[in-house]
Amino acid sequence: MTTKSLEICYDFPFFLQEELEEIFQAHEKTSFQKGEFILEEGKTANEYYILDSGLARSFVNDFNGNEVTTHFFVENEVIIEVLSMFQRIPSQENIVCITDCECWKLDYDTFQELFHKIPNLREWGRSWMSKELFDYKQRSVEMFTLSATKRYLNLLEQKSKVIQFAPLKQIASYLGVTDTSLSRIRKELVSHPNKN
């Protein structure tokens, strides 16, 4: 495991080299096996992870008890349940590994220490949070404004590993369609690749 995922994740123009080194050293290597939970509903998040390799997802259980995928985490992304971590409340979401995952872990207390010690980390945090809010807003709008086929193609373009490794049912719930509809979309794309 290299620090490449840390370098990509903390790519922020104002960090000094010594600040980055301190931040990197505070992270601990950790791994999870396929099917293992990183965070379970009802537990409070006490750390966040930067995914070095593998694929994970977050999901909630709807009122009928069905799993609904809320997010897919790919390499070089932060695996976090923000509300639980920073509000110190039990998580409503589950985060589970779709494949074996190698991660860099940073616990809550260490993050708080660094956050107060390194002003540039606060600026990075604000910048990261703004981007996350923008992405979530964009996704919620696209659920209503784009066709299911276009949403699938966007996912394929942005996170091809999801299409490669995640089960059809999880992708369908993330896109807000049934398994049958997603199967049909995939068949149409294979038989008419230039139609969309």
Image: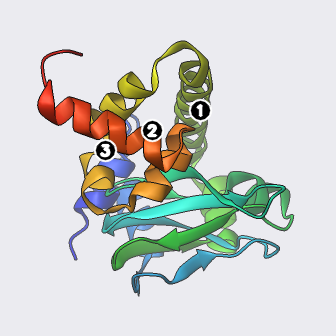
Sequence-earlier tag: 2 or 1:
1
Q: Is residue 124 visible?
A: no
Q: Which is nearer the eye, 42 or 30?
A: 42
Which class describes the residues within 10 Å of circle 2: few (<14), some (14-19), or many (20+)? some
Label 2 and label 3: CA atoms lie apart by 20 Å
Q: Is residue 18 left or right of residue 161?
A: right
Q: Quadrant of the C terminus?
A: top left
Q: Which mark is residue 159?
A: 3
Spot occupied by residue 20 in the image (x, y as percentages of width and height): 38, 56
Q: Amino acid at mark 3?
A: Lys
Foreground tag (2 vs 1): 2
Disc 2: which residue = 181
Residue labelled with disc 1: 136
Which numbered disc, 2 or 3, marks the residue that appears first in the sequence?
Answer: 3
Classed neighbour count for the residue bearing mark 1: other residues with Cα under 10 Å, few (<14), some (14–19), many (≥20): few
At mark 3, the secondary structure is loop
Q: Quick one: SS at disc 2?
A: helix
